[in-house]
Amino acid sequence: MQKRDNAVADFCDGHSCSQAVLAAYCEEHGLAREQAIRLATGFGGGMGRQGKTCGALTGAVMTLGLAKGPSTSLDSAAKEETYRLVAELTARFRAECGATDCKALLGCDLSRPDDYQQAQQNQLFKTRCPGYVAAAMDILEELLGK
């Protein structure tokens, strides 16, 4: 629960959803926090505010790769296990949150300046997104056996 709370706090402090989720687990899997923040930057807002896959979900996918992914091309078992976990993560996130893409989750297109401004005015990043970060973290913690 502490990692979940830390991720939500990081998001509320200004990190993107993808940064907040990846940063919660990065160091225990050999990735420095500063590198994780940089690596996850482009995934926020559904891939650079394009409204595609939610950054909380992509941050969780990157975390699964760090935790379970293969370190060589010869480890096909680890690759298959990671793919299975990503599929489960995605299905569970969709079931809990209703969608996997920002456009559907927020009900607006963040790539359009007017919609982005409206999302800010309606405080969607404060009212909805912390819940998506928390949901991704809860599912991720279960999948990682924490």
Image (tube, rainbow, N blue to C red):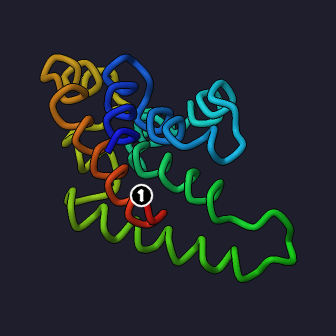
* Secondary structure found at label 1: helix
| Residue at the image position 22 percent from the left and 67 percent from the top | 95
| Residue at the image position 62 percent from the left and 58 percent from the top | 67
- Residue 58 coordinates in the image, percent (x, y): 49, 50
- Residue 125 coordinates in the image, percent (x, y): 25, 28
- Residue 136 coordinates in the image, percent (x, y): 35, 52
Question: Image check: 63 left or right of 96?
Answer: right
15 relative to 92, above or below: above
Question: Image check: 96 left or right of 122?
Answer: right
| Residue at the image position 60 percent from the left and 41 percent from the top | 26
Give the quarter of the image for residue 40.
top right
Question: Image check: 98 left or right of 92?
Answer: left
Question: Image check: 46 left or right of 110?
Answer: right
- Residue 66 coordinates in the image, percent (x, y): 65, 54
Which residue is at the front of the view, 54 or 138? 138
| Residue at the image position 85 percent from the left and 71 percent from the top | 73
Amino acid type, label 1: Leu
- Exactly how many numbered labels are in the figure? 1
Which quarter of the rendered picture does the C terminus lie within? bottom left
33 relative to 86, above or below: above
The residue indicated by pointer 1 is 140
Which quarter of the rendered picture does the N terminus lie within? top left
Give the quarter of the image for residue 64.
bottom right
144 relative to 129, above or below: below
Graded by Cα atoms within 10 Å as few (under 14), some (14 to 19) or many (20 or more), the crowding at tag 1 reads many
Which residue is at the front of the view, 85 or 26? 26
